[in-house]
Image (spheres, rainbow, N blue to C red):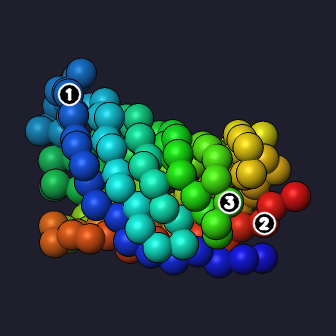
Amino acid sequence: MAQATGTFTVSSWDENTYEELDGGGKLTKATVAFAFSGDLEGQGQWDAVMCYCDDGTATFTGFQRHVGTLGGRTGTFVLRADGTFENGEAKSTWQVVDGSGTDDLRGLTGAGRAVATATPPGTFTFEYELA
């Protein structure tokens, strides 16, 4: 398996509450754009749903479409990104959606992790294989 590492920044964040929960929590939907640098280069757009608890923590899940290059190969692919936010850190796990790779990234499989804090950039590691 090959490994990709690098950094990312948030280019834009649009989040809207669709339900307030008893006790101070809420459910939201967000569309977030990312710029990636390193072994994974390009742009990602993540559409997610989030559940915020009254203690300030959150759990989230969504799909991110990446457009760019991975290990020098160009194409697009989709990641399922699931994670949590607590103590000022957003931690997520990534899983490539089978069959989502295009062009030079057709047949891509893999999984990874990302961490972001209030101070950019965030970091990622991603282990992958190309069929």
Hey, which quadrant is residue 90 in on the image?
Answer: bottom left
23 w.r.t. 19: above or below? below
Instruction: Say left or right for 40 vs 103.
Output: left
Please provide percent x and percent y for residue 53.
22, 47
Q: Secondary structure at mark 3?
A: strand
- Amino acid on which the number 2 mark rests in the picture: Glu
Total number of numbered labels?
A: 3
Q: Please, which residue is most extreme toward the top here?
A: 18
Please provide percent x and percent y for residue 79.
58, 48
Q: Please, which residue is most extreme toward the right here?
A: 131
Instruction: Look at the numbered discs 2 and 1 and tell me whether their residues touch, using CB distance below 8 Å.
Output: no
- Amino acid on which the number 1 mark rests in the picture: Asn
Pick whichever, 26 or 46, lies toward us.
Answer: 46
Of the two numbered discs 2 and 1 on the same chain, state the one appearing first in sequence: 1
Please provide percent x and percent y for residue 39.
54, 72
* Closer to the eye: label 2 or 1: 2
- Amino acid on which the number 3 mark rests in the picture: Arg
Q: Secondary structure at mark 2?
A: strand
Pointer 1 residue: 16
Instruction: Say left or right for 38 vs 109.
Output: left
Q: Looking at the rendering, in which quadrant would you find the C terminus?
A: bottom right
Of the two numbered discs 1 and 3 on the same chain, state the one appearing first in sequence: 1
Pointer 2 residue: 129
Residue at image position (68%, 60%) is 73
Pick whichever, 120 or 59, lies toward us.
Answer: 120
Residues under labels 2 and 1: Cα distance? 36 Å
For residue 73, the mark is 3
Instruction: Look at the numbered discs 1 and 3 and tell me whether their residues touch, using CB distance below 8 Å.
Output: no
Residues under labels 2 and 3: Cα distance? 12 Å
